Amino acid sequence: MLLIVVCSCKSKNALKESKLVKVELIEKIENQLKSSPVLQDDFDFSKRSVFPRTLDESGDVGLVSKRDWTSGFYPGVLWYSYLLSEKPYWKEKATAFTELLESEQLNASNHDIGFKMMSSYGLAYKDTKNEDYKQVLIQSAKTLITRFDENIGCIRSWDHHKDKWEFPVIIDNLMNLELLYWAWKETGDAVYLNIANTHAKTTLKNHFRSDYSTYHVVNYDTITGVAKDKVTHQGYADNSCWARGEAWALYGYTMAYRETQDSEFLKQAEYVANYILNVAKLPNDFVPTWDFSLKDVAEEPKDASAAAVMASAFYELSTLTTNSENKKEYVSVADKMIASLSTDNYFNVPGTGHGFLLKHSTGAKPGGGEIDVPLVYADYYYLEALYRKKGILTTN
Ligand code: GLY
């Protein structure tokens, strides 16, 4: 008993002493979020587009509808604000934005249902255990598996670009598997586990180069199941390594190992970590340029969202790896990323940013869209990383 008391005091002290998860930072986050137009009393919720995604060209908040792939992240930002601050205000707002997404449980038009529903309903269910939320998530998993092709062993990512690709699978798709692992554990139905594992293993075989950098898009032949093209859509070149794609791979295999304890997934996550840390190498401020393969980076935009996704994944991987040197290195690099993102270089100063936390993210440079702007998923993974860091400090 005494030991437990001593340990819990030690954890509280560790949290208090942490330079990263300071009360002042949580307050700064709350104040910044409160300046969003969608949290003002006069905001018109009858409009189709109510979810903040970015800032548009005129500097106003770019709002998207529930069908957009990013729509779940804003409710997720509000859930993490609640989890970090423990203030009921954020839970009330998070609940309201989450429930706006209910009909998305039936949207089978692409793979993004996992991103959307786990960052909103997934967090909502974890907190409330509300049975209605559980049913929405189970239906969402059923919807996602309609896109699985047994012959190929993957969930189809996109239906557009039919002229270019027969069956495109993007590295990002790994992130949607979290919904399937969740459904397997909640329902006991192994169909979700088998599809998630098959997708993860097919991706492991076809999406990586020998140095564990990633191809963004793999296009499969639907008759033979063969991976016939390995190309890019959001990266610099077909043979380059798009930074956020590599971040999705790090996060995806870390999550797959957490859910399954399959050592192949842990090995893959550590190989990807090694690529990021020792092959690609991060810049001095620990926030990557939008593609790791660019030679002359001085004029190229950063991608703070890639750093936020990586930081969150590195914290989690540090709790799973069995190598004590790696554990230290993963925490250390995640700390440096979060510290860098929390400075004025990346965090919007009060009165700017219309409620977004971070600046300097890049969505899709080759398409000319969302270059050097705030992106809601950068904020989401930044907050998740802080929450994970808080968890590490309180359990150690
Ligand atoms: N999943 C889309 C992106 O990362 O831009």
Image: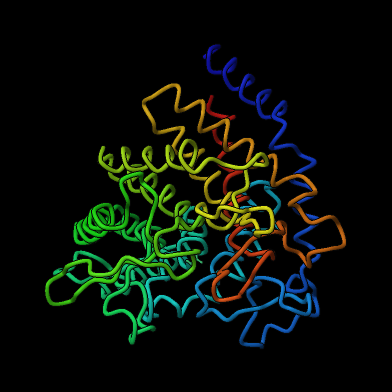
Q: Position of residue 48 (x, y in %)?
A: 61, 87
- Looking at the rendering, which quadrant does residue 38 occupy? bottom right
Q: On the picture, is 366 further left or further right than 227?
A: right
Q: Position of residue 383 (x, y in %)?
A: 62, 50
Q: Which residue shows up at 27% across the image and 74% down it?
A: 147
**Residue 230, relative to residue 276: is it above or below?**
below
Q: Residue furthest top?
A: 2
Towards the viewer: 157 or 382: 157
Q: Position of residue 262 (x, y in %)?
A: 25, 41
Q: Which residue shows up at 36% across the image and 39% down it?
A: 271
Q: Position of residue 46 (x, y in %)?
A: 66, 88
Q: On the picture, is 337 further left or further right than 70?
A: right
Towards the viewer: 383 or 95: 383
Q: On the picture, is 393 further left or further right than 88?
A: left
User: Is residue 84 visible to the viewer in this orientation of the structure?
Assistant: yes
Q: Quadrant of the C terminus?
A: top right
